[in-house]
Every structure is written in structure tokens, then in C-alpha cells.
Image (tube, grey):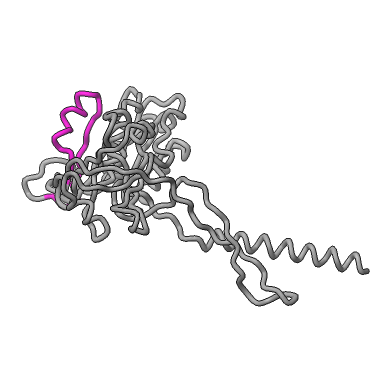
């Protein structure tokens, strides 16, 4: 009976520990979508460290240990703002000069870096790189939406000292896809940044490549000057405005709806890459699913 009681106690303790670990992970802050170069945060790719914390009512005279997660940030190195310019409503294109080894760490379009003004800044910004991997041996280009959290970065003068990490995240792993013949890119607002990096890298090798790029108005749409070069490279660019003025002759509404209206010729052989707000991505994934594109063909950069 004594052994049976001990076994029962061990089973109960194991069950409690398992539920405690599950609770620790489920209570950790959810990582919001990385919307290119916004000031919102996502969990970095660095490995989490588990720390113990005593919580709950004491059991058998001792508080049961719970687990909480803390992220170990990667190392930061010195960098400098090279240039900052407004390229659309609330959007700034910023070039940051970085050491050669940091530039070389950027391998896949869709990856991001963490940037802080200085060591005193507690939380870094997570910014998707807008330039293609290898485009420069000593700098990164970003497209930043100016918010309260990113205003310091958008307003930074050339030569301002900052600190940054090497490239983080999985990026768009399109090289892992096999047998695809078409690529459809969906981007909204500043979400064009990581998509631009992928498309300009040449990694999206397909017979047909389409970019649906959505913004509220034409004045809020960045990189319009690059559209001809993208078209020349074989990318069909389809700008979509949700709140156009009377002079607009192009597509209107939302990119996922325009894509749905256009149709997908061969869903099984189509890869979709996307970046934008949470609501957009949720709605886009519903349209993609209805079109018959397999889940494993849908790539996000986080």
C-alpha cells in the first residue's frame, strides 16, 4: 500500500509539472506578426531560457515551481544611420551602415534585425530588411512606418550611432519549395519591405511571379519608382488601393479580394508569400485556402 501510495503521488506530481510547463508557455506573451519594419515586437530567433518561479498555493509545505520564459537577445554591435528619407505617407526609407560580418549574416529575404538607439534602450525594435541579401556589403535598407515607438529612428540624422544585431528569423524559405511554377506575393503598407527583399534577391524562380501590393492611397504607397524595374525583371506588379481618389484607374479594394477575382491557375504549383497586418493575413489565408493552395505553400517571414 505504501508503494502504491508513492506511485500515486509521483503520478500526481508528474501531471502537475506537465500542466505547469504548459501554463508557462501558454501564458508567455504571444508574438505578434512581424509587419516589416514597424515598431511592434515579435519573439526573436534566439533560444528561450527557462527560469523557475514559485507560484500557487504551497503543496506539502512547499510552493510548486512554475516555469517562465525569458528571451536571451543576441549580441548588438555598433552601427550608424546612413540616410533617412520620407518615401510615402508615414513611411521612411532608412539606410543603416553595419559591419561587413553583420551584412553577410543576411541570407534570406524576409529576415529582420533588432535595432536599439543605445544600450540604455530596454526593448529593441524588430525591423525587416528591405534590401536584398548581398545588395550591399556594408549596409541594410529598411522601410519604417513612423509611430511613437519608431519616431526616434525615422527622425535620426545621418551619422547617428545605433546598435544592431545580425540578421534573425527564418525569412521566406522559398528555396525549400519544390515543383512550383508560380509565385504570388501579397503585401500591404510597410509589409512590402520583406517581400521586396525576396523578389529583388531573385530567389523566387518561377514561370510567373505576381505582386499584389495594397495601400490606402497612392501617396501612402512606397517604392512606386521601382515598379518599372520589377516589371522588367518579370514581376507583374498589381497596385491595389482601398481608398483611392477619383483619378485612380487601377485595382481597388483589398489585395486578397483582387487575387481571388483574378484566380489561381494551378493552386498545387503556386507558392504564396505575404506580409501585412494580422487581419489582412487572416483574411488572405482564408482566400488562399478556398483557392486550393496547400498550407505548406504559404510562406510568412516569421
Residue 98 found in image quarter: top left
Is residue 210 something one can see in this rendering?
Answer: no
Side of 222 relative to 19 (left or right): left
Side of 159 relative to 57 (left or right): left
Q: Which x, y percent locates residue 55? A: 60, 71
* Residue that lies at the very extreme toward the right in this rendered image: 1
Q: Is residue 153 above or below residue 196?
A: below
Q: Which x, y percent locates residue 204? A: 35, 28
For the record, the magenta segment spans: 221-244
Side of 290 relative to 256 (left or right): right
Q: Is residue 289 above or below residue 50?
A: above
Count of labels in the image = 0
Q: Which x, y percent locates residue 73? A: 44, 50
Whether residue 8 appears in magenta in the rendering, the answer is no
Q: Residue visible at 22% across and 33% down?
A: 237
Side of 208 relative to 27 (left or right): left
Q: Residue visible at 24% across and 43% down?
A: 80
Amino acid at each position: 500500500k505504501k508503494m502504491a501510495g508513492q506511485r500515486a503521488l509521483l503520478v500526481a506530481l508528474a501531471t502537475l509539472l506537465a500542466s505547469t510547463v504548459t501554463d508557462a508557455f501558454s501564458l508567455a506573451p504571444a508574438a505578434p506578426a512581424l509587419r516589416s519594419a514597424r515598431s511592434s515586437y515579435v519573439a526573436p530567433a534566439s533560444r528561450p531560457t527557462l527560469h523557475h518561479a514559485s507560484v500557487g498555493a504551497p503543496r506539502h509545505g512547499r510552493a510548486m515551481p512554475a516555469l517562465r520564459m525569458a528571451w536571451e537577445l543576441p549580441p548588438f554591435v555598433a552601427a550608424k544611420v546612413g540616410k533617412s528619407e520620407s518615401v510615402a505617407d508615414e513611411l521612411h526609407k532608412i539606410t543603416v551602415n553595419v559591419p561587413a560580418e553583420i551584412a553577410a549574416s543576411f541570407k534570406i529575404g524576409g529576415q529582420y534585425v533588432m535595432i536599439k538607439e543605445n544600450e540604455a534602450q530596454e526593448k529593441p525594435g524588430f525591423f525587416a530588411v528591405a534590401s536584398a541579401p548581398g545588395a550591399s556589403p556594408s549596409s541594410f535598407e529598411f522601410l519604417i512606418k513612423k509611430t511613437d515607438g519608431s519616431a526616434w529612428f525615422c527622425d535620426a540624422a545621418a551619422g547617428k550611432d545605433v546598435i544592431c544585431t545580425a540578421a534573425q528569423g527564418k525569412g521566406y524559405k522559398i528555396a525549400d519549395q519544390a515543383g512550383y511554377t508560380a509565385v504570388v506575393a501579397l503585401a500591404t503598407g510597410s509589409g512590402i519591405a520583406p517581400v521586396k527583399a525576396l523578389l529583388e534577391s531573385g530567389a523566387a524562380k518561377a514561370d510567373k511571379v505576381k505582386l499584389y501590393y495594397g495601400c490606402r492611397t497612392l501617396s501612402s504607397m512606397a517604392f512606386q519608382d521601382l515598379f518599372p524595374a520589377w516589371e522588367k525583371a518579370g514581376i507583374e506588379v498589381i497596385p491595389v488601393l482601398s481608398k483611392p481618389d477619383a483619378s485612380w484607374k487601377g485595382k481597388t479594394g483589398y489585395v486578397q479580394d483582387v487575387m481571388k477575382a483574378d484566380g489561381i491557375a494551378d493552386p498545387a504549383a503556386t507558392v504564396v508569400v505575404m506580409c501585412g497586418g494580422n487581419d489582412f493575413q487572416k483574411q488572405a489565408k482564408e482566400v488562399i485556402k478556398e483557392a486550393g493552395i496547400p498550407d505548406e505553400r504559404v510562406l510568412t517571414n516569421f
